[in-house]
Amino acid sequence: MSELAAPVSTAPTVAFPAAPAPPPLPQRLPVRFTGSGGEYFRIWIVNLLLTLVTLGIWSAWAKVRKTRYFWSSTQLAGAAFRYHGNPGAILRGRLLAGAFFVAYSVAGRISVTAGVVAGAVLMLLGPWFFYSSMRFKLANTSWRGLRFGFDSTAGRAYAVLAPAVVLGVVFFGSLASMQRIAPGETPNPVPVLLAELALFACWPWLHARLKAYQHGRARYGNLAFELEPSTGAFYGVYGKTFLFALPFFLLQGIATFVVFVVMGGFKDPGAITRALVPIMVVSYAMFLVTYAFAGAFFTARMQRLVWTRTHAGPVRFSTSVTARGFMRVFIVNGVLTLLTVGIYWPWAAVAIARYRLECMTVEAGAPLETVAAGSLPGERSATGEGAVDLFGWDIGL
Amino acid sequence: MAVLEGLLFDGRSAAATPVRIAIAGGVLAVTTPEGVLLVEHGLARLTVTEAFAAAPRQIGLPGGAVVEVADGAALTAALAAAGRRPGLVDRLEARWRAALAAVVACVGVIVAAYVYGLPAAARWVARTLPASAEQRLGDGVLEILDANLLRPTTLSEEEQRAAQARIDDAARLGAPALRYRLLFRAAGFGPSMNAFALPGGTVVLLDGLVRGTASDDRLVAVVGHELGHVARHHSMEAFLKSAGVGAAASLLWGDFSGQAAAVPAALAMFDYSRDAEREADEDGVRFLRAAGRSALPMVDALCLLQGVEREARLGGLPKLLSTHPKLAERIEHVRALDGVDPSYRCPDPPPTASPTCVPDDDENGEDAATGGPAGAPRPGGD
């Protein structure tokens, strides 16, 4: 932003401070990420210690400080983003979400039925958690002095996510039907298989709906975001990822089989138990490998799909992330995080953020000066945010 | 007096106005590059975002406007010169030495919490919880075990009645205040020379144990030991400990998925500590004595288990259900207790440990009890 020093006309209507004359449109807005792993490591470890010694209370402040770091380190057209989340609200949200979480995990251990009921209740609360988390996140983010926002209502969230909730509840219900059988009776696998099949078949459609809602209701000031309908493209990405991952699944199957044979084979009834630990280790390692390759492929394709179809009025987005680029980041991160027993994690988080952000292109087809503050109210409740954090349902923008 | 360049955003539109800011005498002045004064405000009540190495900083002005200063370091210096120092946490976050100290302190806190804090907290909560909560938890665990690892008993009504009577008889004197419930089950697979206590006072006796000890006091000794676990809420304590580990792990590694956190928690479930086993062994001895019997069957029962463990070390379920790497140590301890014969040696193990025992093979010779897979409960009884 050093070019700001250049004397420009005093009129605040100039598109960008560096521009002496209105540039030809559309104008490319540079994206920069200035964070560093070392700096984030210091923030992370100091806040981790404070979280530990305050028995978790500080975690709300830690979240705010970490998010502020990432937001402040992200610059678009020379101006940084800013996170305004209130730690007090986040703490209240986390306590409430924590109560849900404890109820859920205890229920699962008390009895299978209680666990299934708790899972179904959680699923019913899901849309509300998602909606209020999006509101909290966006309403507490600003750029150039204007807040983002999420222009929706809880009712709308339920309408959009109703198919997901119905399928989820059906799936839980079919699981319960497997559990609730008299001793000696063989469980009927048909309902579970059908529910699973329906869930698989609908998943890309549900994901497309969710993304269209998430991106389509976002606001920057009074500028509305939009995601072009793209259900077919979602099916395409999922299909290609499945084909891409197929060799890895086969490899996993072969590895498991080999371990099983090495541990004693089929003739020995004890082999199953003996092979349990090695099979778990092999599966976990294979899962990591699959994630590094197929996950990278999926992430890159999905990012490109979503961002090339997102626009906010005259502002268009695109990203040049590639599967290969994500693979490199994921593999380096994974290996170093494992080797350092987690200490590398902050560097990994920064590397992912840097790769994602620096691959973004933002083009403005009209001066952004015309964007005015929006009329959405601020968001105080962070319960949804707390729940999303706790249950790990992070649906990154 | 420091003069810095910045951009003024009025909070009403995204338009930027280039400005200069000057800090002097505890007052921040915002002027146009030409020197026209726009805003003047006391420094003390302005909010300034944290200083990061390469990030711009924002000064919040009254009324929602902000000034963004690209050169964050220069602003930090100007603020410091005006006597405004960053907060304590900001200063800690900025220093490598503090970060390294934090690494050491984190490890220390985690180790101390695991070694001292967690057991003490679990003990306290286990003793404070109402009996009904413990009962419900025990019922839930039994439901899961019945569905996965246990089968209906093969004992006749008569055998069950005899065992129940033998134990009730001893418990009337041995543990008169304790409420318990005996259940008979067959092991789904593996030898069934075992018993375990569930939270809430349910003691599950496996068929092999009942058959193998039908005519002597070893059954009474084993139940005395299990009732010790019941009276001391050991299984509740182990459950709470595992829940605590799980909660702490997901807090620490919240950035990862919950998957990794579930593993240590599941491993800790039903894993009684060495102290807990020792206490329960002593309870078993007390129980026998109070019931007017010799304490030797406690040693005998442990010997029996040792035999089963040795024999079944590499079989199927024994990995999960046999459990005790320290049986020799426990035998030693009980033998040395007052009034038990310190010179007593374990008799040779009986030829077959239990009717449902899986034939063993000795292909690999690692200790069975070290690495049980996650998720499988390890009833730590005897």
Image (spheres, coloured by chain):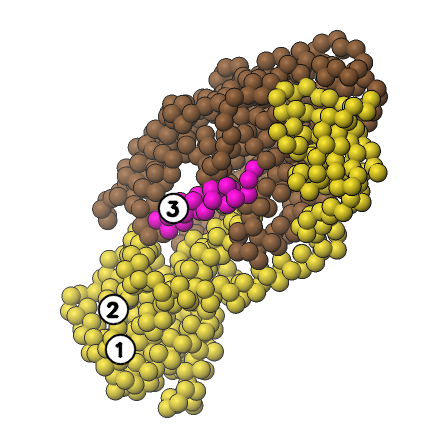
Chain colours: A brown, B yellow
Q: CA distance from mark 2 to mark 1?
A: 10 Å
Quarter of the N terminus of chain B within the rendering: top right
- Residue type of the residue flagged with mark 1: Ala
Position in image of residue B248 (x %, y %):
51, 54
Q: Which mark is residue B175?
A: 1
Q: Is residue A353 above or below residue B237?
A: above
Q: Position of residue A177 (x, y in %)?
A: 28, 39
Quadrant hosting residue B331: bottom left
Secondary structure found at label 1: loop
- Residue pictured at 39% horizontal, 58% vertical: B377
Q: Are marks 2 and 1 in contact (CB under 8 Å)?
A: yes
Q: CA distance from mark 2 to mark 3?
A: 29 Å
Which image quadrant is residue B311 in? bottom left
Which range is magenta? A85-108
Depth check, front residue: B323 or B26? B26
Q: Residues within 10 Å of mark 2 (few under 14, many from 20)?
A: some
Residue at the spot 56% in from the left edge and 50% down from the top edge: A58
Q: Secondary structure at mark 2?
A: loop
Give the residue number, with chain letter if any, for mark 2.
Answer: B180
Expressed as whole percent of the image width and height from the top left, the position of residue B177 reads 25, 75
Report the Cα–Cα distance between label 3 and label 1.
36 Å
Disc 1 chain ID: B
Viewer-nearest of discs 3 and 1:
3
Amino acid type shown at disc 3 = Tyr
- Near mark 1 (Cα within 10 A), the count class, few <14, some 14-19 or many ≥20, is many
* Chain holding disc 3: A
- Same subunit, labels 2 and 1: the answer reads yes
- Residue A74 sits above or below residue A235 on the image: below
Q: Residue A104 shows which numbered tag?
A: 3
